[in-house]
Image (cartoon, rainbow, N blue to C red):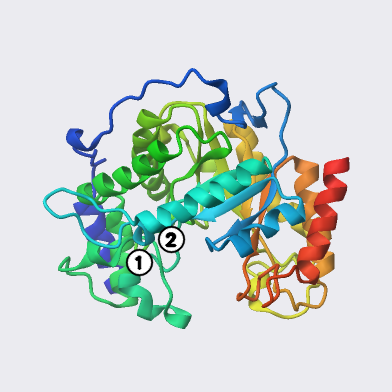
Amino acid sequence: MAASAALCLAVAACDGGSADPPRASQPPVPTTTENPDEMPQVIVDGARFVDKDGRTVQLRGVNVHSLEPAVYERAHEMGANLIRVTVPWDQFEPAAPVGGVRTWDESRLEALDQLVDYCRQYDIQVLLDLHQYGWSPYFSHLQSGGRANGIPGWFYTGRRFQPTDEGRKLAQARFYGDARGIELYSGFAAMLAERYLESPNVLGYEILNEPPTGVMPRKPWVAKRVLRWQGQIREAILRVDPVRTVFFMVPPRVDLRKVDLSPLGRPGGLAFDFHDYYAGTGERGRTTLQGGDYEGTAFAQGAHLEPAVGAAKGWGVPMIVGEWGVFADTVGADVYQRQMVALFESVGAGWARWSLDRRERLSLLGPDGRLNSAGIQLRELISAAAER
């Protein structure tokens, strides 16, 4: 406890200001395309997603963390109109810059291009999620299964962070004020924005999945610091693409009623992503990721989601539940999915189920790549909701 408090004070002392990226790292302001076919198909209008004719768009989809066509092509089979695809920084820049020159993994970018092009054929919106799981491959040995992504491992080489859980928490906390990190991360985000500037079905960019706060406490100033960092990355994106939506997340276990969005910068063009794995039992902290039969109620699920819905309305921004799900073999999984889809539709929140893959317990596919029972039911629920 005392060690954590000391680390927290060290972070606060070292990270007291908003470290802006060096001017040289800012991309040039683009010339806006005059071709309407290259403009986004879906944009933000106040607290709604709308199409080019101003009609409200309800986003219903899945998460994808594989660039295999055999996997993401199932989204069309399900009737999804949204794919939230993970694009962790480390997977697209495998080596540190040399002499200021950055080298991107072109084969992976081309695979992402193919996903975007495929989705365009079927009017599926693509949300590019600058993902992290376990924070960095540098700390992958701390994860169950040894998998982690997000901040490249090379970023921490020689930076004096111990390869321990406490070291990871300190690295997380300091990242939001690290000038070099802000510059490099902004460059990665700007590269993606430039690449997909003329892809009409790219909905937008999510700055960071589930931003962890490390050793920092659960205080309003911490949320402000994380949002300020997201605002800096957002500005780098907007300098390249001032039209598309930028999605933000609030650190976990923060009182959303006390969150001020002003650190995110200019108003408009923002959307809130909230992740919801609540088990709906009325027991605080009980999630669908802990296993066991599903015994949740629609009432409890609605009560759990209400603060996020209320916050989005208060901020005047649209909201998606960018992740939710249950193990495919859970008894009552069908009840859970029915409750959740009905809830999202009733409050007008877009959503993306985790996930479309062949290996995880949360998967909507079997090992053979075909829709499993959860995937088939979700297809039916999407169809019924779209008809309404």
- Classify residue 209 as left or right of residue 271: left
- Classify residue 125 as left or right of residue 25: right
Coordinates of residue 10 in the picture (x, y in percent): 22, 60
Closer to us: 288 or 183: 183
Where residue 163 sits, quadrant-wise, is: bottom left
**Local crowd at mark 2 within 10 Å, few (<14), some, or many (≥20)?**
many
Residue shown at 27%/46% (left/top)?
182
Q: For the N terminus, which image quadrant?
A: bottom left
Report which residue position mark 1 lands on. Answer: 136
Residue 132, which numbered label? Answer: 2
Q: Are marks 1 and 2 in contact (CB under 8 Å)?
A: yes
Residue shown at 68%/64% (left/top)?
325
Where residue 49 sits, quadrant-wise, is: top right
Q: For the C terminus, which image quadrant?
A: top right
Coordinates of residue 260 in the picture (x, y in percent): 47, 36
Coordinates of residue 93 in the picture (x, y in percent): 31, 57
Closer to us: 216 or 107: 107
Is any atom of residue 302 visible in this view?
Answer: yes
Instruction: Work out which residue is located at the far top of the displayed protein and give it.
Output: 34
Q: How many marks?
A: 2
158 up-or-down from 87: above or below: below
196 up-or-down from 239: above or below: below
